[in-house]
Image (cartoon, rainbow, N blue to C red):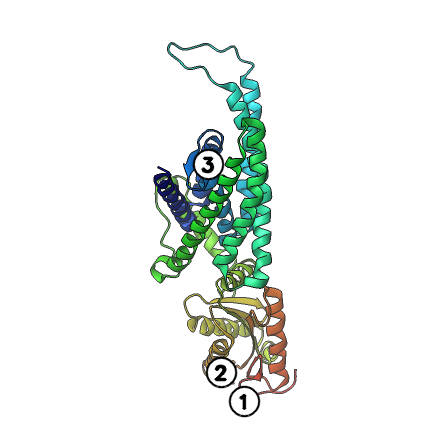
Amino acid sequence: MQVFNLALFLCEAVIYFTVMTVFLHFRRQLGLGVFLAALGVMHFMETYLAAVFYIELPFGTVSPGSSVFFAGKLMMILLLYLKEDAAIVRQPIYGLFLGNLVTVGVAQLLQLHNVVALPAGRAADMGFLNEMGWLMVWGTALLYLDAIGIILLYERLGRLLRRHVVLRFALSGAALLTFDQIGFYAALAVLFDAPFSVFLGGWLAKLLAVAVYALLFAAYLKIEQIPRLARSPGEITDIFNRLTFRERYQALLARSGVDGLTGVLDRSRLEADAPKLIRDCLDRGRELSVVMIDADHFKEVNDLFGHLKGDEVLKEMAARLQADLRAGDHLFRFGGEEFVLLLPDTGHERALTLAERLRAEICRSVMRPDGQRVTVSIGVASAPEDGHALDALLGCADERLYGAKKNGRDGVHGRFGRLVSSGAGTGS
């Protein structure tokens, strides 16, 4: 019987993690609300099961509500943080906590009613409802601490295990669920006189669940890299889309963050999108490169031919840069005649090669109104060697761009100095 219970326990863990991961993966199409609502609906069931439903496993007495569903929810919150950010993560935590406070308050109010018994009806157990409410409040308070702790620990482990994302995922979950088991068992002991075997069995079951979730997380990372599955399909169309004019809203969002002159993404989008792109690459153990591109002697173009002609040159530069982008590359207008290219999954040497190709293409195809060729100076920086944050990488790329200008312009500067030197231009 214990072996059969263990098999069911593992099936429940696999089903929970798989379904919730699907909801999270397709959050762009379904809406993040589907994932968050599913997380909230499961909260009552997991608390109820933790209070009344226990099974015997080979290593002790266990409640699937606590060991499978609560543990799974904490790991889902960490996964949500990895896919989104801390601002999104706090929404379900605050929502669950405040919702549980409302539950306790309403339970107190309901007990003031004069209840009418229905024929063959069963009387409501208001005492149990009250206990459940406080147990949910206590569990959500622990969840709040767990969620903060698991994110901070995951980030701290990144200093030692940056390339081992799955191991960080598992270690963070094991540590925080140990803390949670101590706190939650204290409430069970006070409210329901739970024996110590419940603590020990529940703790071992949570560690087992974390191991299962870590293996499924590793499988998900592999599946996510399959190009056909990684591409985001079109929005799922249903009656709600039509009633709320969602397509118009999506079109409006698509136009935001675009530079009005060149049509490429603007600096605000760089500052909004780049930190997550950098973090995602580093968490997967992959490199990312930042390429800063600046048109040489561009002030001279504006002074000689006027700003309208200068704008035409900038638009042609942006068009040539966009034409040579690979799938997954991101081009931003940083300001004036400066552009920034973000190259995920690209090491330093490959970024230098791409930057030189862009330099040569601009020189070959973009002309000033007087027929002279436009040249560019380029600086290249790569994570993690040159930094782990956007500001550090931009600063490093800008310093190397200045080095390219100082050494004659029309060239590419990387970590080991100048890659190309044509001798075009002098001065600053």
Q: Nearer the viewer, residue 293 or 364?
A: 293
SS at badge 3: strand
Q: Which residue is mark 1?
A: 422
Q: Alpha-carbon distance for marks 1 and 2?
A: 11 Å
- Identify which amino acid the numbered label 1 is placed on: Ser
**The C terminus: image quadrant:** bottom right
Relative to 244, residue 257 above or below: below
- Identify which amino acid the numbered label 2 is placed on: Cys
| Quadrant of the rendered image containing residue 3 | top left
Q: Alpha-carbon distance for marks 1 and 3?
A: 75 Å
Q: Are marks 1 and 2 in contact (CB under 8 Å)?
A: yes
Q: Residues within 10 Å of mark 1 (few under 14, many from 20)?
A: few
Please state if 153 lies on the left or on the right of 343 as rendered.
Answer: right
Residue 98, given in percent of the width and then of the height, sits at: 57, 33
- Label ID, residue 61: 3
Nearer the N terminus, badge 1 or badge 3?
3
Q: Is residue 102 visible?
A: no
Nearer the N terminus, badge 2 or badge 3?
3
**The N terminus: image quadrant:** top left
Residue 184, given in percent of the width and then of the height, sits at: 56, 36
Relative to 292, residue 91 above or below: above
Nearer the N terminus, badge 1 or badge 2?
2
Q: Are marks 2 and 3 in contact (CB under 8 Å)?
A: no
